Amino acid sequence: STTPLALQVENATVRYGLVPAVTDVSLVLAKGQITTIIGANGAGKSTLLNAITGVLNLEGKASLFGQPLDKYPVEERVGKGLVLIPERRELFSSMTVEENLLLGGYTQRGRSASTIEGIYADFPRLKERRKQGAGTLSGGERQMLAMGRALMSHPKVLLLDEPSLGLAPLIVREILNIVVRLKEAGVSILLVEQNARAALKIADTAYVMENGRFILEGTGAEVSANPRIEAIYMGGH
Ligand code: ATP
């Protein structure tokens, strides 16, 4: 028998008004693995994530651990373990690091001291800066805080929208190492990235998105070895 997939999307289309931004895409995310979607600016990656969380309407099918997602309204999906870390890393700038973390605790259990200590163990930098205003953090620290805040709600499936955006290569590596540690801790991860090389290195399964469609899929290794991908996404880096 087969293990249920953490997340499955089948023939999904997402429109803004009448205009489709995502057309007929299907993807799988196996339990405890990393699936990545790579593609250029405007390909439709964020749109797809927002349809999976339910903020945008998804035409087609999506399921979480075998359960159809449309059973759950947007506000219930976090409780089911589905958590998005958006690209812009919206934080409450005037609040401290710790206050931002506490806001991520979706349940009483999530807000417990042991949860917050667990986050500090994963992100020692956040612990050092717990009393500091979130608005004063560096780009990498903001991404860590956005990740830490999401982890406060004990996600089972994490949707990560371009965590490497605007970060220096060394920090990108640090962030992606954290993503791998989360996978090792049992979280299933859907990682959206423009930084193809970095994402493919850690992905079990990969999809390449162009103009709202998947034009190629395979294992991370297969996709990065594809000469077409090499030329388009990784040339000159
Ligand atoms: P980026 O990394 O730049 O966010 P992306 O791959 O995530 O790129 P999307 O943001 O999903 O791409 O955008 C896909 C397409 O949908 C683009 O053509 C974009 O202009 C369009 N789009 C995005 N948001 C809206 C919106 N609110 N209304 C209308 N069109 C939109």
Image (spheres, rainbow, N blue to C red):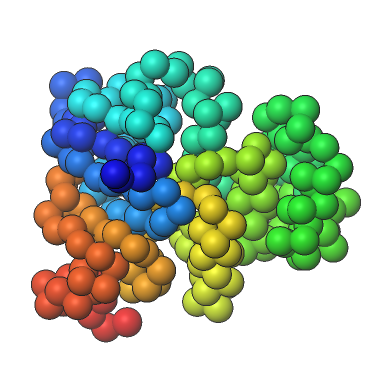
Q: Give the quadrant of residue 92.
A: top right
Instruction: Pick whichever, 188 or 212, lies toward us.
Output: 188
Q: Give the image location of residue 96, x and y in percent.
A: 81, 45
Q: How many marks?
A: 0
Q: Give the image location of residue 230, x and y in percent.
A: 19, 76
> Is 160 situated above or below 195?
above
Residue farthest along the front direction in this orientation: 1
Q: Residue at x 59, y 57 (%)?
A: 185
Q: Give the image location of residue 178, x and y in percent.
A: 58, 64
Is 83 left, or right, of 144 in this rendering? left
Residue 96 visible in the current orientation: no
Q: Residue at x 20, y 26 (%)?
A: 60
Instruction: Pick whichever, 162 or 92, lies toward us.
Output: 162
Is 62 left, or right, of 110 in this rendering? left
Image quadrant containing the C terminus = bottom left
> Is 191 situated above or below 105?
below
Residue farthest along the bottom direction in this orientation: 236
Q: Residue at x 27, y 59 (%)?
A: 206
Q: Give the image location of residue 190, x and y in percent.
A: 40, 50
Q: Residue at x 64, y 45 (%)?
A: 151
Q: Give the quadrant of residue 174.
A: bottom right
Is 43 left, or right, of 165 in this rendering? left
Residue 163 visible in the current orientation: yes
Image quadrant containing the N terminus = top left
> Is 50 situated above or below 167?
above
